[in-house]
């Protein structure tokens, strides 16, 4: 699939792994951290006038609302650029949310697209059957000016998931299990193609969770075939024609991994790496200071519903801080209508506006020394969420909610 999408955008009949190509881009994303240096690179090279504003999406999401003067100036820079260049797809505070959730939700990325973004988790969109990858700000500036990117065609690893997914097990557990098996370097610059009956049974949001964490295995991109679930999701969102690409039945993969998901329980990634995997049962009882439910990985409406299912009518344990951040304002609004926000507030938690916030350790939930957190995010490297001595366990929303109730890491199946 990945080779076909790249070939189509490079104007070639086919491409091979290792081949270097220039490929036209459909979507270019930047946010309040990566946008300003990209704009600076454009201006320094006198390329600002060459950009195509129709292809550019700008989202304020990392430090919003701004926590200090520097973050305020970053937001100002993005606003000014969007206004000067008539960029319609600009999402200010309160209008969008986290970029990787906003773009699919708003129909800005479609099956068959080639999308790049100034953020490593741009690979999220691959669940729609497109090629999506993150790049540094100079590459993003070049893409804005040229309308194309320079790529090395990645080799493809195939991941087959069969069997029936267990209760309180989600796409988050499937990708954690995968990263645990292949390690955080296991897909270095590879395309990760996800197939199998278990993948077909996943709702779109959980598919996004899996492709979101491709970068945690060092992958170049993640991709899933377009099916009825995909088409239903994009219908009414994407208002343009799109192309569907499928891998040939005799396609040659560099390596194939097979998983029986029936054997996968709720999992955690222990400090300090997403591949340090254990079952929740193996680490149950670990005392926790803060639970965070949100991020581009697990801030979807379905994730909030999962957490609320566990927490409804409950109170968080004494000494626990519960922070919930819906990934977009659209998700926030729907969660309000469904009474989900009330569940978290009634339990003693706080619900913050859509932002990356605690995930990269920027604001609204930064961890202190020796504190222990259970996060539904994607990374738990040392210092990622605050102090280098803070310890973060990555889980799915069910486990996070169960942990908030008891004050210690808890298997949701025991609640």
Image (tube, rainbow, N blue to C red):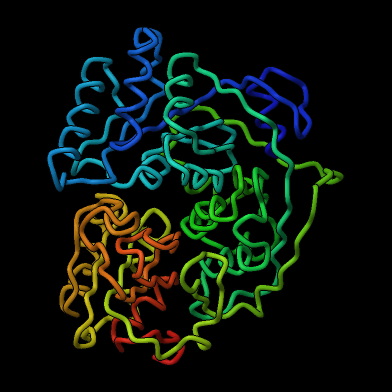
Q: Where is residue 92 drawn, in percent x and y?
A: 21, 36
Q: Is residue 187 above or below residue 36?
A: below
Q: Quadrant of the N terminus?
A: top right
The quarter holding residue 297 reads bottom left
Q: Residue at x 75, y 42 (%)?
A: 247
Residue 96 position within the rendered picture, expressed as x and y whole percent measured from the top left: 27, 42
x%, y% of residue 109?
47, 35
Residue 160 lies in quadrant: bottom right
Number of numbered markers: 0
Taking 243 as reference, is 89 left or right?
A: left
Q: Residue at x 26, y 17 (%)?
A: 86
Query: What residue lies at 55% left-to-right and 81% top-to-bottom?
Result: 279
Q: Nearer the viewer, residue 131 or 233?
A: 131
Residue at the extreme right of the image, as rendered: 250
Relative to residue 382, is residue 58 drawn left or right? left
Q: Quadrant of residue 257?
A: bottom right
Note whether 302 is above or below 237 in the view shown: below
Viewer-closest of 262 and 200:
262
Q: Residue at x 20, y 59 (%)?
A: 364
* Percent x, y of residue 141: 42, 22
Image quadrant where one finds the C terminus? bottom left
């Amino acid at each position: 699939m990945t080779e076909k999408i790249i070939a189509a955008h490079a104007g070639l009949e086919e491409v091979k792994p290792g081949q270097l190509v220039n490929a036209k881009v459909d979507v270019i994303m930047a946010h309040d951290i990566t946008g300003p240096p990209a704009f600076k690179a454009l201006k320094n090279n006198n390329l600002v006038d060459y950009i195509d504003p129709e292809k550019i999406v700008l989202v304020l999401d990392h430090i919003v609302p701004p926590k200090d003067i520097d973050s305020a100036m970053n937001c100002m820079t993005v606003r000014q650029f969007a206004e000067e260049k008539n960029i319609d797809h600009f999402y200010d505070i309160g209008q969008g949310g986290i970029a990787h959730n906003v773009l699919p939700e708003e129909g800005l990325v479609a099956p068959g697209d080639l999308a790049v973004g100034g953020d490593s988790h741009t690979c999220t969109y691959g669940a729609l059957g497109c090629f999506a990858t993150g790049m540094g700000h100079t590459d993003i500036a070049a893409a804005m000016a040229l309308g194309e990117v320079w790529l090395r065609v990645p080799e493809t690893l195939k991941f087959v998931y069969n069997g029936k997914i267990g209760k309180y097990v989600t796409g988050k557990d499937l990708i954690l299990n995968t990263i645990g098996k292949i390690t955080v370097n296991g897909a270095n610059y590879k395309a990760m193609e996800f197939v199998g009956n278990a993948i077909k049974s996943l709702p779109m949001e959980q598919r996004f969770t899996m492709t979101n964490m491709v970068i945690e295995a060092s992958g170049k991109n993640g991709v899933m075939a377009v099916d009825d679930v995909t088409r239903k999701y994009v219908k009414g969102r994407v208002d343009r024609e799109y192309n569907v690409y499928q891998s040939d039945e005799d396609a040659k993969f560099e390596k194939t991994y097979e998983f029986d998901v029936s054997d996968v329980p709720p999992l955690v990634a222990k400090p300090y790496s997403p591949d340090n995997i254990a079952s929740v049962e193996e680490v149950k009882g670990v005392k926790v200071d803060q639970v965070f439910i949100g991020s581009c990985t697990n801030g979807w409406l379905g994730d909030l519903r999962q957490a609320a299912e566990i927490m409804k009518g409950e109170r968080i344990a004494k000494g626990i801080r519960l922070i919930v951040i819906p990934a977009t304002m659209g998700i926030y609004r729907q969660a309000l209508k469904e009474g989900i926000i009330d569940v978290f507030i009634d339990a003693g938690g706080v619900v913050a506006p859509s932002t990356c916030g605690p995930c990269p350790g920027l604001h609204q939930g930064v961890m202190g020394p020796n504190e222990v957190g259970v996060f539904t995010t994607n990374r738990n490297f040392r210092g990622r969420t605050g102090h280098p001595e803070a310890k973060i366990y990555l889980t799915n929303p069910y486990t996070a909610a169960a942990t908030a109730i008891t004050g210690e890491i808890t298997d949701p199946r025991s609640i």
